[in-house]
Image (cartoon, helix red, strand yellow):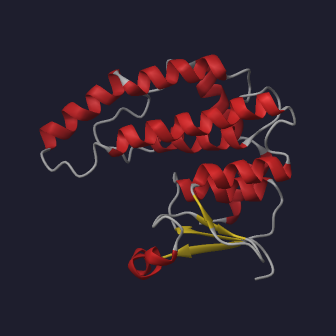
């Protein structure tokens, strides 16, 4: 292996996508290993925690967990603030974003349509609104820490894109629209030249 390798499914709006995007913004030449879902069963036992993404560097053991990968990219390549306290604050947003993901994931696998509607309505009115309000307090603008994009901005952008995409049935695509700082952050990341370049070069 001559360059870093990131392994994940070929999915947008995902933990893997936020790591891919962070690596690209950092200017890292990496192997973007996108596996088909059918290959996962054989690969799973070889991963550190039975999950993806997995990040590998020559001479190092593989590392899993998206927040650990983002933290490494942020510290090594300048996508986290130099100030340690401010960097910790940014990394706290990574954890908060995962908390929200887990809350949404609890509504997956429910077969009864009416029950899904009920659970998603409760999510929209409760945890998602609370998360949005708390995040709003953390954003300086246009990005989390001001004018410089960080891995925290990338993760929040991917989470918000998940909601905006409409793939989550019975969850309004504008569920976070009442939070202007969050909406501005989303738009600022979307319009960042390197983010535009990333999506211009991938299908």
Left of 181 or right of it: where is 102?
Answer: left
Note whether 33 is above or below 191 in the view shown.
Answer: below
Residue found at x 78% / y 77%: 59
Q: Is residue 199 visible?
A: no
Note whether 31 is above or below 194 in the view shown.
Answer: below
- Quarter of the figure that contains the N terminus: bottom right
Residue found at x 81% / y 54%: 26
Residue 90 occupies which quadrant of the picture? Answer: top right
Question: Which sits in the foreground, 98 or 166?
Answer: 98
Residue found at x 54% / y 20%: 134
Residue found at x 76% / y 59%: 24
Q: Position of residue 91 (x, y in %)?
A: 67, 37
Question: Which sits in the foreground, 103 or 113?
Answer: 103
Residue 103 occupies which quadrant of the picture? Answer: top left
Q: Is residue 33 visible?
A: yes
Left of 115 or right of it: where is 146?
Answer: right
- Quarter of the figure that contains the C terminus: bottom right
Q: Position of residue 147 (x, y in %)?
A: 82, 29
Q: Position of residue 152 (x, y in %)?
A: 67, 38
Residue 199 occupies which quadrant of the picture? Answer: bottom right
């Amino acid at each position: 292996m001559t360059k870093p390798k990131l392994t994940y499914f070929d999915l947008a709006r995902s933990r893997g996508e936020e790591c891919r995007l962070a690596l690209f913004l950092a200017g890292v030449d990496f192997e973007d290993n996108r596996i088909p879902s059918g290959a996962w069963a054989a690969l799973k036992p070889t991963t550190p925690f039975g999950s993806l993404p997995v990040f590998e560097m020559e001479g190092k053991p593989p590392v899993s967990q998206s927040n650990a990968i983002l933290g490494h990219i942020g510290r090594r390549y300048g996508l986290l603030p130099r100030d340690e306290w401010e960097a910790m604050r940014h990394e706290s947003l990574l954890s908060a974003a995962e908390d929200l993901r887990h809350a949404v994931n609890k509504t997956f696998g429910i077969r009864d349509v009416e029950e899904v509607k009920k659970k998603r309505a409760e999510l929209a009115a409760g945890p998602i609104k609370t998360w949005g309000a708390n995040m709003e307090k953390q954003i300086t603008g246009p990005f989390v820490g001001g004018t410089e994009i960080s891995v925290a901005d990338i993760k929040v952008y991917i989470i918000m894109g998940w909601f905006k995409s409409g793939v989550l049935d019975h969850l309004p695509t504008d569920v976070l629209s009442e939070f202007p700082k969050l909406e501005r952050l989303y738009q600022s990341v979307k319009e960042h030249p390197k983010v535009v370049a990333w999506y211009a070069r991938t299908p």
